[in-house]
């Protein structure tokens, strides 16, 4: 099993939205490295921190589990979608997503609190200039953060 941190803007999809839906595709990722994580590395059963980004209080808001393997992100084919990609075709999709299911809502663990722990200094989320919407989380980092959430 691998561990991940997945960022979503809560005005688009929040942890509460995922809880209400039960599960959802992680659509709209338009960064090749983040796409490759979903397409090539994420497996059903992997665990992820659900991170609220680009909001007044960014931070970990809950947990989710990968529940379906990578598949073509349908938004790339929809001309009405902000994620439409005219170069993508059904035969040669450019963008992929995994489905995630709601696991648990947690207390909000703000980025400032995460930055305060030297045990997390190597986390990609905390590196200067990192803007990826999906990043791996080391097992030791996962355990440490889970301890903070208890």
Image (spheres, rainbow, N blue to C red):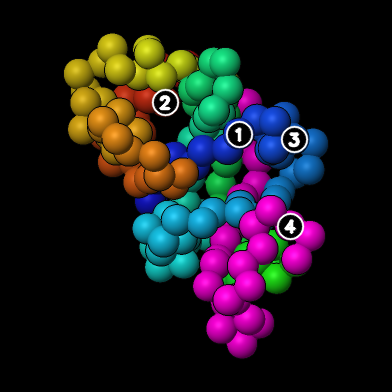
Give the side of residue 77 with respect to residue 110, left or right. right
Q: Which mark is residue 81?
A: 4
Mark 1, residues whose alpha carbon is within 10 Å: few (<14), some, or many (≥20)?
A: some
Say which of marks 1 and 2 sits in front.
1
Q: Which residue is mark 2?
A: 146
Q: Earlier in the sequence, mark 3 or mark 2?
A: 3
Asked if the stretch drawn in magenta spans residue 86, the answer is yes
Q: Earlier in the sequence, mark 1 or mark 3?
A: 1
Q: Earlier in the sequence, mark 4 or mark 1?
A: 1
Q: Is residue 128 above or below residue 18?
A: above
Q: Which mark is residue 17?
A: 3
Q: Position of residue 16 (x, y in %)?
A: 72, 29
Q: Are marks 2 and 4 in contact (CB under 8 Å)?
A: no
Please provide the residue range marked out in magenta.
79-105
Q: Quadrant of residue 86?
A: bottom right
Give the side of residue 137 with respect to residue 67, left or right. left
Q: How far, Cα to Cα, is label 4 from label 1?
A: 16 Å
Q: Which residue is mark 1?
A: 9
Q: Quadrant of residue 126?
A: top left
Asked if the stretch drawn in magenta spans residue 50, the answer is no
């Amino acid at each position: 099993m691998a561990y991940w941190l997945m960022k979503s803007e809560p005005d688009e999809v929040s942890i509460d939205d995922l809880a209400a839906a039960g599960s959802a595709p992680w659509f709209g990722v338009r960064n090749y490295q983040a796409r490759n994580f979903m397409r090539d590395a994420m497996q059903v059963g992997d665990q992820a921190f659900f991170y609220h980004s680009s909001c007044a209080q960014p931070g970990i808001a809950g947990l989710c589990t990968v529940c379906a393997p990578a598949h073509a992100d349908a938004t790339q084919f929809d001309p009405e979608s902000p994620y439409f990609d005219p170069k993508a075709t059904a035969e040669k999709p450019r963008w992929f997503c995994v489905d995630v299911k709601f696991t648990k809502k947690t207390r909000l663990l703000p980025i400032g609190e995460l930055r305060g722990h030297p045990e997390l200094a190597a986390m990609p989320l905390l590196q200067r200039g990192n803007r990826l919407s999906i990043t791996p989380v080391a097992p030791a980092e996962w355990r440490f953060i889970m301890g903070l959430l208890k």
